[in-house]
Amino acid sequence: MKAGKVWGTTELIEANGALEFHRIEMNKGGTCSKHLHRYKWNGFYVESGRLLVKVWQRDYELVDETILEQGMYTKVKPGLYHQFVCLEGGVAYELYWAEFNHNDIERESIGFVKKENMLTGRLIEPEEEKDV
């Protein structure tokens, strides 16, 4: 579904439990609201035109500004205020996703290789070796 914005249009391409993917058509001079996403990353990829992405840092008094042109990409961390300004009309894609915890594994056991019992020829687990 395509939705009109003061700066252009946005069209949702995909939304699921892992990400959102939008196509945006931007008008020269159009500026989105200054906003943040508490939990989501926000990525911008420019297909055509020029886009200025402003990011207000929390750790220091600075606004980072990145100008994106055709084929360029940047991303904004969750919790940071940001805003884009369309320097030249065109098309861009916006991605939203939450960070996965790559260390979320809890092991109840450890991996092993079964060994062959020389008397019976059957494969046994390490604990069974003690019983033989």
Image: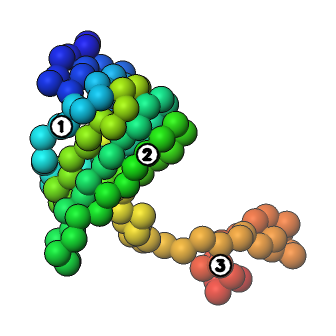
In this orientation, does residue 30 appear? yes
Q: State the residue at coordinates (26%, 13%).
A: 1
**Colour option used:** rainbow
Amino acid at the residue labelled 2: Leu
* Mark 1: secondary structure: loop
Label 3 Cα crowd, 10 Å radius (few <14 / some 14-19 / many 20+): few
Q: Position of residue 84 (x, y in %)?
A: 26, 43
Amino acid at the residue labelled 3: Pro
Q: Position of residue 25 (x, y in %)?
A: 33, 22
Residue that numbered label 3 is attached to: 126
* Mark 3: secondary structure: helix
Tell me if label 1 and label 2 are in contact, CB under 8 Å. no
Q: State the residue at coordinates (13%, 48%).
A: 35
User: Is 49 on the left or on the right of 84, as rendered?
Assistant: right
Amino acid at the residue labelled 1: Cys
Tell me if label 2 and label 3 are in contact, CB under 8 Å. no
Position of the C terminus by quadrant: bottom right
